[in-house]
Amino acid sequence: MPGKPLLIFPSPSTTKRKEEKPRFGTTPYHFPDFQNQKDRLTPQFETMLQSFITDTADGLEPENVLVIETVGEIEDFQRAVRYIHGLEWLAEIDEEAIEPDDDFYQTCKIKKTLFSEKIKHIKRKQSSQIWGLLLKNAFIDKNGYLLDKDINEFQQFIPIEFSEYSEEIVKIARDEAISHRKQLLSGRLFLSMSNKQAIDKLLSLWTQWDSGDKKLPRPYGKWTEIFKQTRIIRKWDTQDRLRDTGIIDYWKEELEIKKGTASKITFEIELWYRNDDAQRQEIQEKISNLIFNENGSIITTCTIKEIRFHAIKAELPPQNIEKVLNSEYTKIFSCNDVMLFRPVGQCRVAVSPEGTERDFESGNTNGEPIVAMLDGAPFTHHNLLKNRLIVDDPDGFESDYQVSFRKHGTAMASLVCHGELDAQEEPLQRPVYFRPIMKPDPNDFKNNPPWENIPKEYFMEDLIERSVRRIFERDSNQGVVAPTIKVINFSIADSAKMFFNQLSSCAKLLDWLSYKYQVLFCVSAGNINTDINIQKNINELRTLSNDALLRHTTSKIHEDIRNRKIFSPADSINSITLGSIHSDKSTTNNIGNRFDILPNQKLPSPISAHGLGYKNSIKPELYINGGRQLYNVVNNICSVSDSGLAPGQCVATTPATGGEINRCVYIRGTSNSAALATRAAAQIYEMLNSLLSGNGISIDDNNIAVVLKTLIVHGASWGEGSNILESTLKTIENSRSFKKVIARYMGFGIPDIHRVLECTSQRATAIGYGKIKKDTRHDFRFPLPPCLSGRNEMRRLIITLAWFSPINPANRKYRKANLSFEPPTDSIGVDRANADWQQVKNGTVQHEVLEGSEVVSYQDGDFLKISVVCREDAANLDEEVYYGIAVTLEVSESVDLRIYEEIKDRISIPIQIEEKTQ
């Protein structure tokens, strides 16, 4: 055990969460007036009705998916659907970046201080007086929102004392209004399966809605709000099924290879999830017959109720796909039971070059495995991996793997067990459980050895679910294979499923599994291996200073940030997602013609995918060394160099000739970062195990993984990389929200694992844990050290809270458990630094770094009260939620204050949870 081990919080007191007043306010959006809305939507309703009549006459399906596109927020749409016979709720999808028009736009809110901020000679009180005149004369409402009245007319109401500024005052208000009207809007897509009876009823309600203010009769009152805010009402059509999934580009690429051959083109069909088992089976058979009718075949199907996922993997002849690309749609492509057509998952990993030989010695492990890996089969005879892996291969994937093809799993296992070989760290003491889920691609004729991928005869979702269930549950043929697992490494990403607002099915699966089994997934963000248009040739780049080159490269990456988002399943809310820092432990002697376009080891790698995550949560949470990625620069275009030489991260690899067991190679990428994060979690586990046993504490097994999740994030901070990003990317337009820009590139920051393994005299860390119910509060007490009272020393307070949330995939809010805390800033003289205070609460980790040097006096015995509160987010939170919390208080190592000892003397070990009610 370290000389200054982490401290353990006493058990928290439990109280009922205080009731919060609901927050009401005028919507910031302008909607069409009643008559305009009638004129806009009546033709759309009539078109919908006519389409049902036409389809029925033609003998087509009597059901269509109804799409209602709205602006602004509307809650309880599912309830509104229940009262319309013939409507079946399917999904709600958040929409961002909706273009405003004359009917829908953002309403301008005039602040009371606006005119004093814009006009030098107007004071705050006078500005408030002008605001009052706007209200009195009905130019704004009581909340400050501009009303539908010509602002130019306000000039006649401006008092004589402001007459010299009257034109300027009106211009300021007008400019504010214009600026707001240009802002992009947000809204929702409401999707329901509907028949003609349902459309008839909706049309009847629409006809009854004869006044913009009059509500429809019960139980249809919610439709008044829906009608008011609806932009478009239409059918889900073929274009919806093909748009924004990457399927068109995928089919074009496949046609280039397979056109004119007997080979078929494989793709995925995701169906609208129906709750009734028999109905799902009937739909699946119908889709299968449509595929058979086009000389196609069904490869496999997948249904996972817990995430509302139902899909078919099928294949069709090239000529059938070519018709689709020519806009000739057969019945399968116009089938209303189909939600989306998707490419086959592109979970493919490139092989690494052959590398070089070194002298490595094998070793032994002891104990039960804590870490599991899902990856390609490893080369277990390598000296670095011998006796370290428990390979479990019930699907027989290893039989399809030549030894020389086992690149990715070998490299990732090397990083998990040993870290970067150049760092010469101690290996993990426990064995690692390993489940192969990839094979060499039998259709990869371009690469030798072929790339490794998820076999096409499987759904990745099905493979992962079966693999994880096998770890924790027994079945009729097999007992539980590795019940001690707390961390699962997943260094695989699906490049065909980049995150755009909607969670992927695989992300939902990881979320469900992580809560069900209380296990932490460490997931790679994905690599962006596309070329970068650097707009300078190699000679121009070489003449730039390092600072100028950093700014230039960063700006070019930022210009393309929309195409550099995380890949599935990195969008999982319960997992820790890892991006890469452009850094490693290697020594570089010769880079040849390769070029480092980012000469700094504190910034994200040029190949790392970035956030944000679901509902603008912070993703990736952490950025860890992923190796320095060099580029080949030709004609102003930078392409990734895949050299096996340094720089990069040195790992074990497969033999180049028979009998080799010591070959290594340099590689780079977010897979490496996820593997190193997994290794760090294993190291934290050993520290935690020693700490708890040393204090005679027995922790609930369900709390262990969330405490590991808490501690791996707890040591993270942005560091100097944020300063470089700020100097390059900060503008007047994004200055107020720039913390969100940094979070997109750096998450919560770069973790320093050593900081959470032990304390120092000037740094004390306490950990706590528990399980909490909805509408409950747990209060932790962190003692204040007397030596810091009345001192003006810079101090840092870090608080991290993490949990696994149960999910509700039928609810757009999705995350059922919303845990949070409010940092006690005043008690210790600190203010928030690093990530945005609201954004940190959008995921399943809240990590707050607070700094300051304000002199604060307090008494010996005073403490910081940190309250963990549990609120329901998505509906039906009936489960208890396990969580971990860590709190650190520190001063500079150069300051002679006994922070650790004084906190240690004042914190006690828990005996039992103290129950209270208020």
Image (cartoon, rainbow, N blue to C red):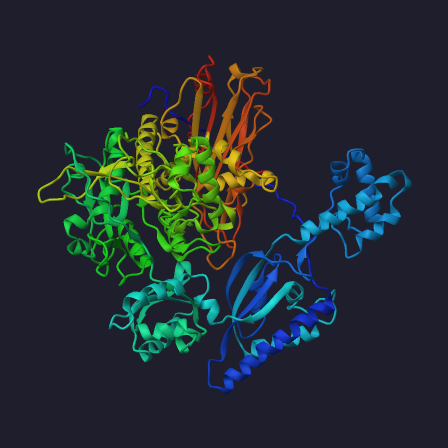
Image point (36%, 73%), residue name: 322
* Residue sitting at x 50%, y 27%: 797
Judging depth in this view, the residue of 232 and 586 nearest the camera is 586
Q: How many marks on residues?
A: 0
Q: From what the image shows, is residue 102 above or below residue 669?
A: below
Q: Quadrant of residue 498?
A: bottom left
Please state, as top left, top right, bottom left or bottom right, where the N terminus lies in the image.
top left
Residue 103 visible from this viewpoint: yes
Q: Quadrant of residue 390?
A: top left
Q: Position of residue 778 (x, y in %)?
A: 51, 36
Q: Residue at x 58, y 39 (%)?
A: 731
Residue 19 placed where, x, y %?
Answer: 62, 44
Q: Is residue 900 left or right of residue 649?
A: right
The residue most toward the left is: 659
Query: Does residue 777 appear in this view?
Result: no
Compare residues 145 and 175 and report the one nearer the observer: 175
**Image coords of residue 93 (percent x, y):** 52, 59
- In the image, 53 versus 711, the foreground residue is 53
Seen from the viewer's position, the closer of residues 263 and 635 is 635
Q: Residue at x 80, y 56 (%)?
A: 149
Q: In the image as oriented, which residue stretches furthest toward the front?
A: 539
